[in-house]
Image (tube, rainbow, N blue to C red):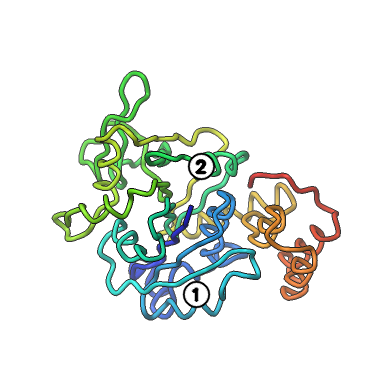
């Protein structure tokens, strides 16, 4: 399975912070925001990843992440000339996807929870259909909303409904089978001129192959697209890390646990980050001071 991180958009809701840099390069506590969606795909076992962003911002992602080899993954890059909807990612990534199944994660979404890795790997091995994740929110009118029947089966998805039929929002993480590019080509622009991911999801729903996995207690989903939510995400990460005395979404650690990089590479990364808590953590993992086998 391939993976795409969509890190486009102008980030106008975060001005003036994003007047000179992409919001996905802003810090969420101790790491660039892009580390979190990248760690999500890596937890799912995905190693071949395309990052899509604006012509202005894409070189900055390349400078930060390189070809991905230091993380045990292969990173490619693609320019998004204009933000024309989330489903556009599959049209821009058609050559990269190459007829494979593909996951998409939004560059400003953070996922956390015990056992999350198992959930993601299960979604990544689905051979037919699509898997999306529903999360209970207080303001569902801001999102795509899933309606369930009495047997908790999804029966409809509505984008930003005026009168939501449930409180379950569709998060910015999607797993699709090898039909996704063909389906994306059938999506028509919405009244606001965008290729809506909701319309793509409805195609899978209509043919009976859409799986909606709800994320319940013990899981957190954060959409960092506003100033307040960005601040709250930083506070959340800080609280979790202080409570468990170790960082989350450490991409080199995930790569090492997955067997994608060697202990020598992990040590090299630890020394590169110097005396920072992030670097010290990598050195502690390499020295076997921290037991692996987590699903953060």
**Image location of residue 123, percent across then percent down:** 49, 41
Mark 2 or 1: in front is 2
Q: Which mark is residue 237?
A: none
Of residues 211 and 108, the one drawn nearer to the viewer in this rendering: 211
Residue located 80% across and 68% down the image:
264
Q: Residue furthest left?
A: 191
- 146 left or right of 4 in image: left
Of residues 20 and 127, the one drawn nearer to the viewer in this rendering: 127
Residue that numbered label 2 is attached to: 125
**Image location of residue 95, percent across then percent down:** 37, 66
Q: Please identify the quarter of the rendering in which residue 265 is found.
A: bottom right
Count the marks: how many? 2
Using the numbered discs, state the Cα–Cα distance from disc 2 to disc 1 in whole angstroms.
Answer: 28 Å
**Image location of residue 111, percent across then percent down:** 52, 49
Q: For numbered disc 2, what is the local secondary structure?
A: loop
Q: Please identify the quarter of the rendering in which residue 152 is found.
A: top left
Q: Please identify the quarter of the rendering in which residue 190 is found.
A: bottom left
Residue located 70% across and 47% down the image:
243
Q: Earlier in the sequence, mark 2 or mark 1?
A: 1
**Image location of residue 258, percent across then percent down:** 68, 53
Residue that numbered label 1 is attached to: 61
């Amino acid at each position: 399975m391939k993976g795409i991180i969509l890190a486009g958009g102008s980030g106008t809701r975060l001005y003036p912070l994003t007047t000179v840099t992409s919001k996905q390069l802003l810090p969420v506590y101790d790491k660039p925001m892009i580390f979190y969606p990248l760690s999500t795909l890596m937890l799912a076992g995905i190693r071949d990843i395309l990052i899509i962003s604006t012509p202005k911002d894409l070189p900055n992602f390349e400078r930060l992440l390189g070809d991905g080899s230091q993380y045990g993954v292969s990173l490619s890059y693609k320019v998004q000339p204009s933000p024309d909807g989330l489903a556009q990612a599959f049209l821009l990534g058609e050559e990269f996807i190459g007829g494979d199944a593909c996951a998409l994660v939004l560059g400003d979404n953070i996922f956390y929870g015990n056992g999350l890795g198992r959930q993601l790997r299960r979604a990544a091995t689905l051979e037919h259909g699509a898997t999306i994740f529903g999360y209970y929110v207080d303001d569902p009118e801001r999102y795509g909303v899933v309606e369930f029947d009495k047997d908790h089966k999804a029966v409809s998805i509505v984008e930003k409904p005026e009168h939501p039929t449930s409180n379950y929002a569709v998060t910015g993480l999607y797993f699709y089978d090898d039909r996704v590019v063909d389906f994306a080509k059938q999506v028509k622009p919405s009244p606001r001129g965008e290729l809506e991911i909701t319309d793509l999801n409805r195609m899978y729903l209509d043919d009976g192959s859409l799986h909606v996995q709800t994320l319940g207690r013990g899981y957190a989903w954060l959409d960092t697209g506003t100033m307040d939510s960005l601040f709250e995400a930083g506070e959340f990460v800080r609280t979790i890390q202080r409570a468990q005395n170790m960082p989350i979404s450490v991409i080199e650690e995930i790569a090492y646990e997955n067997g994608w990089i060697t202990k020598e590479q992990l040590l090299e990364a630890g020394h590169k980050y110097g005396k920072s808590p992030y670097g010290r953590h990598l050195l502690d993992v390499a020295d076997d001071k921290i037991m692996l086998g987590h699903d953060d």
